[in-house]
Amino acid sequence: MTRRLAALTGAALVLTAGLVTIPPAAACGCGGFATPAGTVAGMDIIGEQAVISLVDGTERVQIGLDAISDAPQAALVIPTPTPAEAALGTSEVFTALQTLAQPQPKEVSVWWPKFGIGWGAGAPDGVGASGVEVFQEVKLGPLEVVSLGSDSLEDLLAWLEQRGFELSSALSEGMQDYVADGWSFVAIKLSPDSAEFDGEIPPVELTFDSDELIYPMRLSAAATTMQRVRTYVVADSRVDRTDVQGEDAELLFAGPLDAQAEPDLADWAEPFGDAAYVTAHEQDFWDPEEEVVADFTFATSSTQGDFHRTYEVEV
């Protein structure tokens, strides 16, 4: 079967990692993928990004993934601290954020040309199993989305298995921690061979009650390949990552969000008015089993002020 691109962003990402073979149940930062039990098909996750905001106790997250798969179907399970409602996102949001956060040229005067290595280089690169409560069940284009919860991992796994999907033991163990913490889950069924599937799957937007800005990451400890995750936080000021892994995150951008200049982001900026601000971080996990130990959390930064990456243009 020909391998297809299943892009939850609906657009190419700049977060591209090397293509690798993924076992039938793969992990991404936000959750875990499962392909039909008994198949040898795989799913290669090659990029992940999310935009996040928290307004009056309601967190809003839009998730975009790039993956290549030859599976006829796949399911993505995303943990959330409270029951979530799902809706379709828009790929234009990520396109606008990528443009906003891209490096800016910095002119450097050069009186004598540089020769040798590096000269001339350019810019850098419904309820099934008992014990499972279904909060929402909705069809979003080619996606079938169910928001559910249970205090029993066994019931959750049985719910997935009844629908033909079996998670790896590593992902199942990761879900146990979320179940013990009282979290809920969003199960998203992707059907690449459905009549509506055209090679691209739109991003998914989730909203749920939360006391803090948080992005679920712990399931990524089950990943066997490098994980690269980019987050954009829309708030009223610059934010820092506050989880124990945050010190290794790279700051990509911090600056105001002008809704008039970026109309595709106006809906995200609106709750913050003229104070709307975007902070972008990116982090690579080369050994997820050892390095992924907590969810991403964010708080107002102790260092305020804008930040732009630059690359030198010799003049």
Image: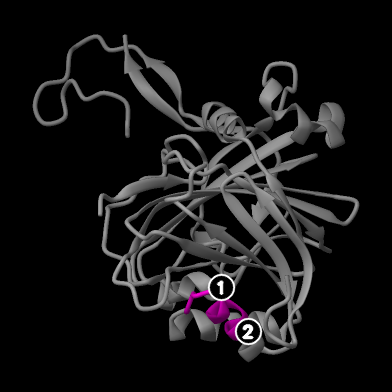
Front residue of 307/20: it is 20
Q: Is residue 224 left or right of residue 202?
A: left
Picture coordinates of residue 269, whole percent (x, y): 78, 32
Q: Tell which of 70 and 306 is nearer to you.
A: 70
Residue under the image location 52 percent in, 83 percent down: 172
Q: Where is residue 252 in the image (x, y as percent from the top left)?
A: 52, 40
Disc with the residue nearer the chain's start (1 vs 2): 2
Dot 1: what SS? helix
Q: How crowded is mark 2: few (under 14 residues within 10 Å), some or many (20 or more)?
A: some
Magenta: main secondary structure equals helix
Query: Could you tell me which quadrant the C terminus lies in?
Result: top left
Magenta stretch, residue numbers:
156-166
Residue named by callout 1: 218
**In which image quadrant can residue 58 be found?**
bottom right
Residue type, numbered disc 1? Arg
Q: Is residue 97 visible?
A: yes
Residue 153 marker: none
Q: Name the residue under label 2.
A: 177
Q: Are marks 1 and 2 in contact (CB under 8 Å)?
A: yes
Query: What is the crowding at mark 1: few (fewer than 14 residues within 10 Å), some, or many (at least 20)?
Result: many
**What is the total number of numbered labels drawn onto the structure image?**
2
Q: Where is residue 24 in the image (x, y as percent from the top left)?
A: 36, 72
